[in-house]
Amino acid sequence: MRDADFDDLVNTLLQKTKQGRLPWKDAKDRDAFSCALGAFTFDLRRVEADDRTVIQLGIKDSPGHLLWEVRARSAVSSVRPEGQGNLYHRLCDLLELARNQALGLDAKLALLRETLANA
């Protein structure tokens, strides 16, 4: 897959996830989430390696063959550089949206607030 194709794919995943149109699930590993969509599954995870954070996005077909995978590493600086850093930050955004959906964080936060208010 060409870089431009993968960029478009990540942008579409971000947009559809923001709209709540993708069924992200907890993959039962720390910071790992999956989304089954038709004949494809997206696997998204955060991994700590060499004092940097790596975000991985893999795409599998229905038999489970890995078709494509991209990995983006955090930059040393907090500035959002073009290229790899930009991909990293978009994958981070996608991971946080998928995490929020898969774990139901909005509902849990509302319950936590209610619990604290009634304590």
Image (cartoon, helix red, strand yellow):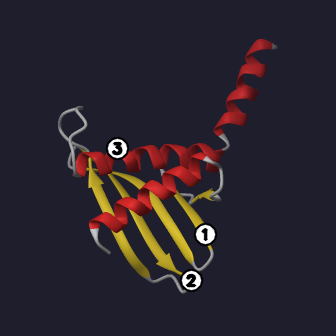
**Amino acid type, label 3:** His
- Give the alpha-carbon distance from disc 1 to disc 3, as whole Å: 23 Å
69 vs 61, left or right, is left
**Residue that badge 2 annotates:** 62
Looking at the image, tell me whether mark 1 or mark 3 is earlier in sequence order.
Answer: 1
> Tag 2: residue type?
Ser
Task: State the residue position of label 1.
Answer: 36
Choose mark 2 or mark 3, whichever is in front: 3
Under mark 1, the amino acid is: Ala
How packed is label 1: few (under 14 Cα within 10 Å), some, or many (20 or more)?
Answer: some
Question: In the rendered picture of this protein, how many numbered marks are placed on residues?
Answer: 3
Depth order, front residue of 29/11: 11
Query: Which residue is at the far right?
Result: 118
- Quick check: 34 above or below 38? above
Q: Nearer the viewer, residue 14 or 24?
A: 14
Decide which of tag 2 and tag 3 comes sooner along the chain: 2
Quarter-wise, where is residue 104 in the image? top right
Q: CA distance from mark 2 to mark 3?
A: 28 Å
Whether residue 119 is visible to the viewer of this picture, yes or no, is no
Q: Which residue is mark 3?
A: 89
Q: Residue at x 50, y 57 (%)?
A: 13
**Quick check: marks 1 and 3 in contact, CB under 8 Å?**
no
**Picture quarter with the C terminus:** top right
- The crowding category of the residue bearing disc 3, from other C-alpha atoms within 10 Å (few below 14, some 14 to 19, many at least 20), is some
Residue at coordinates 49% horizontally, 51% vertically from top-left? 14
**Number of residues whose C-alpha sits closer than 10 Å to that of mark 2, classed few (under 14), some (14–19) or many (20 or more):** few
Q: Is residue 115 above or below residue 45?
A: above
At a point 58% along the width and 46% down the height, the residue shown is 18
Q: Percent from the top left, x then y, of residue 55?
A: 36, 53
Please say whether residue 50 is visible from this viewpoint: yes
